Image: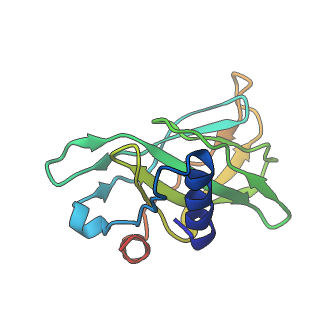
Amino acid sequence: MRGLDKALLAVATVACSTSVQAQVYEPRSCLEAGLDISAPNILKASDGLVHLSVDVTNEFDQVISGIRFDGVLRSPDREVPLHRFWFWEPQIGGGLSAGETMTIEAYIHLDDNAAQFLSGPTSVVAEYGVTNLVDADGHPQFDHPAHFDWDRSRFASFCQ
């Protein structure tokens, strides 16, 4: 959590009930938690939404739920906000033109106990190029990048 978010959480907790002591949840180390993040994959592209699937596993190879992407899609001319959900498939609204490239820049939040986030600064996740605005079925068509990779060194550094 960023400093302002921590302060707002503390204020909100106190405002709701003065008999409850404010709690601020600190990020835990990703490395201590034994977490690993898979490369994001495109599940489908339709109606302007790109669906990504990301698995987060613990040291026992158990999949952990609760992933949120929070950021923007950037192209040379504009920025498009990401939709925010808790789910398996982050939905990213594009509205992109043919030939336009978007870079997904997102905060990565992992929630393994419904109360504590692991979060950090913006990290570039992947780039997509739009080859054709509409495919044969009338859906947007996106390039599938040849190489998908999280910058794991940055990920490890921002959630320690």
Q: Nearer the viewer, residue 115 or 139?
A: 115
Q: Nearer the viewer, residue 152 or 102?
A: 152
Task: Inspect this view and state whether residue 20 appears.
Answer: yes
In this view, the residue farthest toward the front is 19
Left or right, residue 16 beside residue 73: left
Residue at coordinates 57% horizontally, 57% vertically from top-left?
9
Q: Position of residue 34 (x, y in %)?
A: 21, 61
Q: Position of residue 94 (x, y in %)?
A: 73, 44
Left or right, residue 10 beside residue 20: right
Question: Is 94 rendered above or below residue 45?
Answer: below
Question: Is 151 rendered above or below residue 89?
Answer: below
Task: Find residue 121 and report its image quarter.
Answer: bottom right
Left or right, residue 16 beside residue 157: right
Question: Is 12 rendered above or below residue 122?
Answer: above
In this view, the residue farthest toward the top is 137
Task: Find residue 76 and report its image quarter.
Answer: bottom right
Q: Position of residue 96 (x, y in %)?
A: 78, 47
In this view, the residue farthest toward the right is 77
Q: Nearer the viewer, residue 44 or 4?
A: 4
Task: Find residue 137 and report its image quarter.
Answer: top right
Instruction: State the scheme by which the image is colored.
Output: rainbow
Task: Inspect this view and state whether residue 126 appears.
Answer: no
Image quarter hosting the C terminus: bottom left
Residue at coordinates 61% horizontally, 59% vertically from top-left?
11
Q: Position of residue 144 (x, y in %)?
A: 54, 48
Residue at coordinates 63% horizontally, 69% vertically from top-left?
4
